[in-house]
Amino acid sequence: RIMRPDDANIAGNVHGGTILKMIEEAGAIISTRHCNCQAGEPCVAALARVERTDFLSPMCIGEVANVSAEITYTSRHSVEVQVNVMSENILTGAKKVTNKATLWYVPLSLKNVNKVLEVPPIQYARKEQEDEGKKRYEEQKLDRLETKQRNGDVILPVINPDPHTVGYSQSSLIHLVGPSDCTLLGFVHGGVTMKLMDEVAGIVAARHCKTNIVTASVDAINFHEKIKKGCVITVSGRMTFTSNKSMEIEVFVDADPFVDEPRERYRAVSAFFTYVSLSKEGKPLPVPQLLTETEDEKRRFEEGKGRYLQTKAKRQAQMQQAAQQ
Amino acid sequence: RIMRPDDANIAGNVHGGTILKMIEEAGAIISTRHCNCQAGEPCVAALARVERTDFLSPMCIGEVANVSAEITYTSRHSVEVQVNVMSENILTGAKKVTNKATLWYVPLSLKNVNKVLEVPPIQYARKEQEDEGKKRYEEQKLDRLETKQRNGDVILPVINPDPHTVGYSQSSLIHLVGPSDCTLLGFVHGGVTMKLMDEVAGIVAARHCKTNIVTASVDAINFHEKIKKGCVITVSGRMTFTSNKSMEIEVFVDADPFVDEPRERYRAVSAFFTYVSLSKEGKPLPVPQLLTETEDEKRRFEEGKGRYLQTKAKRQAQMQQAAQQ
Amino acid sequence: RIMRPDDANIAGNVHGGTILKMIEEAGAIISTRHCNCQAGEPCVAALARVERTDFLSPMCIGEVANVSAEITYTSRHSVEVQVNVMSENILTGAKKVTNKATLWYVPLSLKNVNKVLEVPPIQYARKEQEDEGKKRYEEQKLDRLETKQRNGDVILPVINPDPHTVGYSQSSLIHLVGPSDCTLLGFVHGGVTMKLMDEVAGIVAARHCKTNIVTASVDAINFHEKIKKGCVITVSGRMTFTSNKSMEIEVFVDADPFVDEPRERYRAVSAFFTYVSLSKEGKPLPVPQLLTETEDEKRRFEEGKGRYLQTKAKRQAQMQQAAQQ
């Protein structure tokens, strides 16, 4: 679809959250279709996880986004979908790869939302494809367990914070979950949640550096719990790490099922977003360094540095590999 | 309502699809109101057909759209509505007629969606009005039968197409039908479908001529089948004909009721849109000629030429008639 | 226009904020049109104030909202607009008055946004109409000065609050101002701000009483300062008073012009909203009493009680007057 003014920031760059929402919609459609392709209990595919994704080149107002999706692996109860996004300038015909994302879905029964159904297996052209898919499946399963642990954290408010401290830029928003945010099962689309997360992360980044900012990448996101229609969700973000030219922001999503539900507020999702600051000409700008004050902030900064260095090393290894081929 | 940036293309011209959506909403309100004006089974009016409509003058961001609707004929099971759209520049006070459209609605029972109810007859000021309405009714009935036949066609993807061929500009989008797209009966509003069709047709036109383009007219659209909430719809468009200064694009809408429905994908709507290419000053530009390759493409080009010449002849006859009066 | 699922809460009642937004759009159109009706500098009417408005009967999904607006008084630099909203059930034909609102607009030059232009005077049918309008004009001018004073207040976060305290239900959201939120001058529409304010007030009310809630009335709202495109706005609400069956919530809007602007965060709007809690049958429910803890909370509770008793007395006087006529 064509990118509109509301999809973009004031500099004309399309919000990363808009792209994440399109990616998830494509993934949900293809995996729901696949899981219903055999006779049996009808189901809706629910997003369980998105692998780390990089925003390779910015998309602008007036460009057309081409989203294509393919199922690349199926386990007994989950589907792996590969989604590619290309931006096309229809006036010049120029096309660029914007994103490649890998998503994991789980089929939930339309009749009983807590029942996970079986996934019809796909055929692989080569045996190695199945083996590689299985490896990816095992890896993400491990990673999901890990992230579950850092989930208890809460973002506390800070009174009169100094510029460039964590408290200065931390932000949160509340959103009442409406019908358009939800699937046929009455649960929030993963893409809607990701869009709100990107919105908060973007405001944290802009508050910190007071310039035009864009999403550079999103770390793997695990969807631990479903969020129901009528909930109020609180999306909070805080900065965890800055390198010379990037900022890492941690985002939490809490659901508050307050009407007619005895349940307490719970953590539904958490993730790390990386942003860069851009000049008016679209060049990356240096970022003010984050001032850490408490022990926890210093620890999170070091952890963020670890993720940053690891990603950098991986990217260099890939580039060397590519150069050798 | 006031036209917003998201209603318009990058040159500031409001999308034809936005106007079609407003027209249909006005038509649906007036005909639902009329069909419920007598005691009896409550019903919702469903769009069955839109007659050919011309976009007489462009509407811009910041202008106010005034939409007025009137019931002009009733048969036993259908209602004809005439809708007029005026654009008003509230800064200068200037008003212009933007569109005149004729829509046909059918009342469906709220209790049983497959039951068509009877329409309360309207009073005509003069006998001729009734006779003319009846003639229009018979004509559209015939035309609906005809279009049902060209409905089996499918748009196949083309690898590495040459510029200005049919394959080069053909496009499609998918959309998951959400609650806000639907009527009280849980079926997609005709106006929502028309807006998506215009979006795809606009992308086809822009890909072909790489300039700013606007909707010039929409051929009669027949709504063969209802589309239910939760369906995925695929809207595809391909160019069929070019004159010196206009492009004709054929658009198909297919519905895929993939969850909880044993039904196969089906063709719900098809229509022809005509676009013109505009310079920065808003003047019509020459259009690159369409290169037809296959026998089918050549046949469709000739059919498009037929429609073009017929419309041109009709318009000239109307102008002569107007000049004589 | 037809009310959609997205305009309403889960019980099907249309959000007060949706209605306020429609009212303001109608007011902005009629006053902009009026202020440009004489040759001279083109201008856009900006909302300065909305008088207290009551929500007389709820509107539901599927109903059609009819909004009509009339200019009732003009001073040298401002326009008073009376807007009426009727809900119409197009299935039964039943119509009900939903709202009556009075809005004040000021014409700002399109060329220089800080220049207030002169308003063309309207003609009054009777001399008393002009005198009464003048009286209303003087009253609202006084009232605007008063509310400017309580503007410095800030909502501080509370850690681990007890149920039914002020801290327990207080809420805030952030919103990045996009192009569709803005007028031709690049400033946020008053209606967009009111919709966000109602959203926050509604969440505060729902958090307090954990039931389905609806907007009962909105106290006069003064728009002290314009908010520019690209700003981040923070909308915060806290409960100030509860009667047996109603809750009063104070809402603040702060603007943060962080990109490329040297300006500090500033208070743009503040207002009081009153909510009632409804049972599943739509009957008003008793409301849990607000637990006030600090001196400030107790003072605000007493002030709220004052406003509540004053409104109650006024309404009884009006009913007696109506009974005598």
Image (tube, coloured by chain):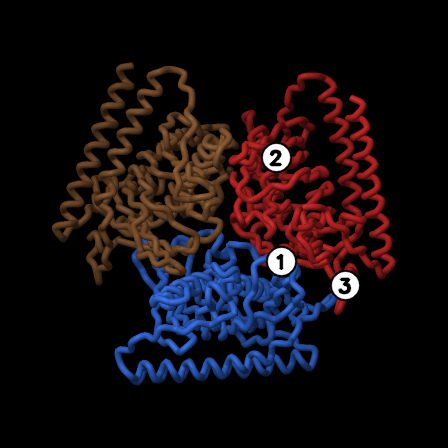
Chain colours: A blue, B brown, C red
Mark 3 or 1: the one toward you: 3
Q: Label 2 to label 1, Cα distance in Å? A: 29 Å
Query: Which numbered disc flags the more N-terminal residue, 3 or 2?
Result: 2
Whether residue B117 can be seen here: yes
Q: How many marks?
A: 3
Q: Chain of mark 2?
A: C
Q: Residue at x 78, y 41 (%)?
A: C145
* Mark 1 element type: strand
Nearest to N terminus: mark 3 or mark 1: 3
Q: Which mark is residue C85?
A: 2
Q: Nearer the viewer, residue A189 or B8?
A: A189
Callout 3 secondary element = loop
Q: Are marks 2 and 1 on the same chain?
A: yes
**Who's the residue at 56% across and 62% down the image?**
A228
> Residue A108 has which mark?
none
Position of A145 compared to C251: left or right?
A: left
Q: Residue at x 26, y 15 (%)?
A: B324
Based on the displayed image, in which of its 4 quarters is residue B70 positioned? top left
Give the Cα distance between marks 3 and 2: 37 Å
Which residue corresponds to mark 3? C163
The vertical placement of C298 against B64, above or below, is: below
Q: Is residue C48 left or right of residue C42?
A: right
Checking the image for residue C174, the label placed there is 1
Instruction: State the image coordinates of residue C267 (x, y, percent, origin top left).
Output: 70, 51
At label 3, which amino acid type do we have? Pro
Q: Is residue A115 above or below residue B210?
A: below
For label 1, count other residues whose C-alpha is less than 10 Å away and answer few (under 14), some (14-19) or many (20+).
Answer: many
Provide residue A102's location: percent of width, then percent of height: 41, 72
Mark 2 crowdedness (10 Å alpha carbons): few <14, some 14-19, many ≥20: many
* Quadrant position of the C terminus of chain C in the picture: top right
For the residues beneath circles 3 and 2, the answer to whether they share a chain is yes
On the image, the x and y values in percent for residue A273 come to: 53, 71
